[in-house]
Amino acid sequence: MLDKNKIGLALGLFLAVVHAVWALLVAIIPGPLQSSLNWIFVLHSLEPIWILTPFNFLNSILLVIVTFILGYIFGWVFAWAHKVVHKGK
């Protein structure tokens, strides 16, 4: 059986690291990052509409914290649902 706390922590940590890397890239290479975003939009047959804002340390910290918390919640719910589905087996 999946441990709800461990799955929550693992997913929360994964999402926090991904978003910390994103924040670092925004701080270090915003120009090439914007070009990459524009290219991804075009690949999806979409007009690029998002523009990177200047790096803000506080926003980046909040981004990492919020994604960790949401990742933990989603991981916990996933493990709970897995347990419910497999309870009769």
Image (cartoon, helix red, strand yellow):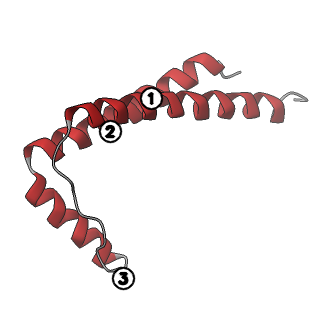
37 over 4 or under it: above or below: below
**Upstream in sequence: badge 2 or badge 1:** 2
Q: Residue at label 1?
A: 68
Amino acid on which the number 2 mark rests in the picture: His
Amino acid on which the number 1 mark rests in the picture: Phe
**Upstream in sequence: badge 3 or badge 2:** 2
Residue 45 numbered tag: 3
Percent across and percent down for residue 33 are: 16, 57
Figure quadrant of residue 65: top left
**Mark 2 surroundings within 10 Å by alpha-carbon count, few (fewer than 14), some (14 through 19), many (20 or more):** many
Figure quadrant of residue 24: top left
Query: What element does badge 1 sit on?
Result: helix
- Residue 33 versus residue 52: which sits nearer the camera? 52
**Mark 3 surroundings within 10 Å by alpha-carbon count, few (fewer than 14), some (14 through 19), many (20 or more):** few
Q: Residue at x 20, y 33 (%)?
A: 57
**Upstream in sequence: badge 1 or badge 3:** 3
- Residue 9 versus residue 51: which sits nearer the camera? 51
Residue 5 numbered tag: none
Percent across and percent down for residue 1 are: 71, 21
Q: Which residue is situated farthest in the right direction here?
A: 88
- Residue 67 versus residue 14: which sits nearer the camera? 67
Q: Residue at label 2?
A: 19
